[in-house]
């Protein structure tokens, strides 16, 4: 948890994004070091999903800059960013319900198809449940299994930065623990992770640092420990 | 019994044409997200191009067929920007707008065919393409099966099998299916949406071109009105099968071909369209969402 290199994998500078007349992000600054888990804290509508999708290259940037591995990626489409090692595990998992587990995984390896077999073997070793269900359509999986599939699909792309949007939403508490364990394990294997969560306590417990968003503004940032002990956070998000 | 067997084979040949057309239509619907009602009209356009090239080259079959296929690919990709202009603006399927564009394309093509080729008279394909001068290829009792029917059936089966292989066993096919199921989700996992859309136009172009060649062999002739007739049937088949349902289109397309052939075999041939539509009317009343269910995200 403590080991931190000085290399920044992602820098967001003064980022502004609007949907029509509504400004969703109002000048955000954020950075992620290689090997870090950074958590985004905030209520619904705070801009967490917008931020992640904008980093991925889906939304148009009004102002500001996004640097990935030291280079600006403004205007770069999502498929190019995925090719360069970025992957988003979307809110609600985003698995393709009518496609098999195997096809879903192979979609993750779309830009990396030569290594697909090897990657899939590794993924099946880490997630035996998915191996058992490889020929079933994703529709037949439970919520937790779908979340695993969505994370496993990210791994198929050989990512360096994984963004995970609300992984615990709609899952039973025991399964939430499993998912957080998976995320921590991924981080130990060296993946940099940007995590958005409403389960603030659990997320901060496994993260290095965190940012607090409120209606498109960054209101607070710090190490996970600082945030956990911050009276404002405790009151607003931890019910203490 | 002989009539039955002959008409069954005949029906499968015709049916495989419908399957090709319905699959092309469904691919455009699912991947490019347009209702290309006039897709069969573009196929008839390619038949005319093929015919014109056959005329100029002294019935060179290879050049004629290539011209048909190439013209279909070019026509499909050339019309893509118009559809995609709407797609970009709306960001989701706008059935009304894409249908109007498609109908416009269809009407222009039909007019061009009426005025620009053979003074609007039906065109006839040369015997070395249709094989009719050599008579039937197979004669068993009363059953006679023409070379055209056999070629259409065999090539149709191979093309449909190849297409389903591409869709369900290859990287490009996986991307097609993912975009068909959830375009937004497909973008988030890094699939190139525009590029894959263009690929689907190209693929349906290839499909349309091959269908044009097969139709020329099977029918031996074409008229400007053929495209509209086909378009109505293809739309009906795809709705009855369930819009966007590829496997359903396969089954219903073959069934329609066999049904028409049976009507032609046992009743008067001129009633086959009317009877086919009566049957389809009944099916759609019983199953308004299609026999196999819609597959639209």
Image (spheres, coloured by chain):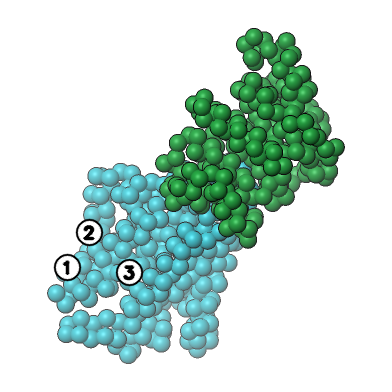
Chain colours: A green, B cyan
Are the residues at dot 3 and dot 2 in contact (C-beta closer than 8 Å)? no
- The N terminus of chain A appears in which quarter of the rendering? top right
Label 2 marks which chain's residue? B
The span from disc 1 to disc 2 (Cα, nearest Å) is 10 Å
Q: Earlier in the sequence, mark 1 or mark 3?
A: 3
State the separation of the CA atoms marked 1 and 3: 17 Å
Q: Nearer the viewer, residue B297 or A211?
A: A211
Mark 1 — on which chain does it sit? B
Residue labelled with disc 2: B275
Q: Dot 1: within a 10 Å radius of its alpha carbon, few (fewer than 14), some, or many (20 or more) residues?
A: few
Q: Is residue A142 left or right of residue B135?
A: right
Q: Chain of mark 3?
A: B
Position of residue B73 in the picture relative to residue A201 (left or right): left
The mark found on residue B14 in the picture is 3
Q: Residue at x 39, y 52 (%)?
A: B245
Cβ atoms at labels 1 and 3 below 8 Å apart? no
Which x, y percent locates residue A102? 50, 51
In the figure, is residue B70 to the left or right of A189? left
Residue drawn at (71%, 22%), measured in percent from left and top? Answer: A213
Q: What residue lies at 54% left-to-right and 76% top-to-bottom?
A: B67
- Residue designated by label 1: B267
Of residues B272 and B292, the one nearer the viewer is B292
**A83 to A46, vertically: above or below:** below
**Residue sitting nearer the eye, B261 or A74:** A74
- State whether residue B18 appears in this view: yes
Task: Identify the residue at horizontal 33%, vertical 49% (top origin).
Answer: B292
Nearest the viewer among B6 and A12 is A12
What secondary structure is found at the residue carrying circle 1? loop
Determine whether label 1 and label 2 are within 8 Å by CB.
yes
Give how far apart the Cα atoms at labels 3 and 2 are.
Answer: 16 Å
Q: Quadrant of residue A148?
A: top right
* SS under mark 3: helix
């Amino acid at each position: 948890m403590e080991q931190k290199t000085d290399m920044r994998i992602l820098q967001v500078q003064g980022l502004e994004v609007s949907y029509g007349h509504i400004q969703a992000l109002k000048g955000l600054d954020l950075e992620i070091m290689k090997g870090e888990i950074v958590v985004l804290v905030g209520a619904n509508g705070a801009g967490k999903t917008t931020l992640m999708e904008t980093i991925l290259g889906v939304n148009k940037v009004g102002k500001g800059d996004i640097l990935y591995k030291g280079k600006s990626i403004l205007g770069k489409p999502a498929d190019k960013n995925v090719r360069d090692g970025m992957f988003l595990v979307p809110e609600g998992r985003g698995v393709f319900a009518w496609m098999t587990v195997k096809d879903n995984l192979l979609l993750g390896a779309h830009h990396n198809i030569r290594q697909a077999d090897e990657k899939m073997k590794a993924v099946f070793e880490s997630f035996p449940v998915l191996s058992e269900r490889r020929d079933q359509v994703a529709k037949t999986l439970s919520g937790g299994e779908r979340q695993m599939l969505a994370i496993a699909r990210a791994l198929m792309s050989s990512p360096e930065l994984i963004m995970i949007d609300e992984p615990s939403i709609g899952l039973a508490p025991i399964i939430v623990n499993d998912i957080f364990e998976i995320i921590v394990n991924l981080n130990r294997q060296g993946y940099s992770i940007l995590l958005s969560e409403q389960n603030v306590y659990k997320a901060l417990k496994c993260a290095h640092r965190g940012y607090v968003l409120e209606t498109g503004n960054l209101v607070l940032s710090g190490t996970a420990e600082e945030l956990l002990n911050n009276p404002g956070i405790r009151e607003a998000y931890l019910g203490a | 019994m002989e009539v039955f067997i002959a008409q069954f084979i005949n029906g499968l040949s015709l049916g495989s044409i419908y399957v090709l057309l319905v699959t092309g239509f469904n691919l455009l619907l699912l991947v490019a997200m347009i209702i290309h009602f006039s897709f069969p009209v573009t196929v008839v356009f390619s038949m005319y191009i093929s015919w014109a090239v056959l005329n100029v080259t002294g019935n060179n079959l290879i050049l004629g067929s290539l011209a048909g296929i190439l013209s279909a690919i070019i026509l499909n990709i050339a019309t893509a920007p118009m559809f995609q202009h709407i797609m970009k603006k709306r960001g989701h399927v706008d059935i009304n707008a894409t249908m109007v564009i498609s109908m416009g394309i269809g009407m222009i093509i039909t007019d061009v065919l009426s005025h620009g080729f053979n003074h609007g008279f039906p065109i006839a394909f040369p015997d070395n393409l249709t094989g009719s001068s050599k008579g039937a290829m197979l004669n068993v009792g009363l059953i006679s099966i023409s070379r055209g029917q056999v070629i259409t059936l065999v090539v149709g089966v191979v093309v449909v099998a190849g297409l389903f292989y591409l869709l369900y066993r290859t990287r490009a096919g996986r991307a097609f299916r993912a975009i068909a199921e959830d375009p937004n989700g497909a973008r988030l996992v890094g699939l190139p949406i525009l590029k894959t859309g263009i690929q689907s136009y190209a693929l349906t172009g290839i499909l349309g071109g091959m269908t044009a060649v097969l139709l020329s062999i099977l029918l031996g002739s074409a008229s400007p009105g053929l495209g509209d007739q086909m378009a109505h049937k293809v739309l009906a088949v795809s709705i009855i099968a369930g819009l966007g349902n590829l496997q359903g289109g396969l089954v219903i397309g073959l069934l329609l071909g066999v049904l028409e052939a049976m009507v032609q075999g046992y009743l008067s041939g001129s009633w086959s369209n009317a009877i086919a539509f009566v049957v389809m009317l009944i099916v759609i009343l019983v199953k308004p969402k299609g026999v196999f269910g819609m597959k639209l995200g």
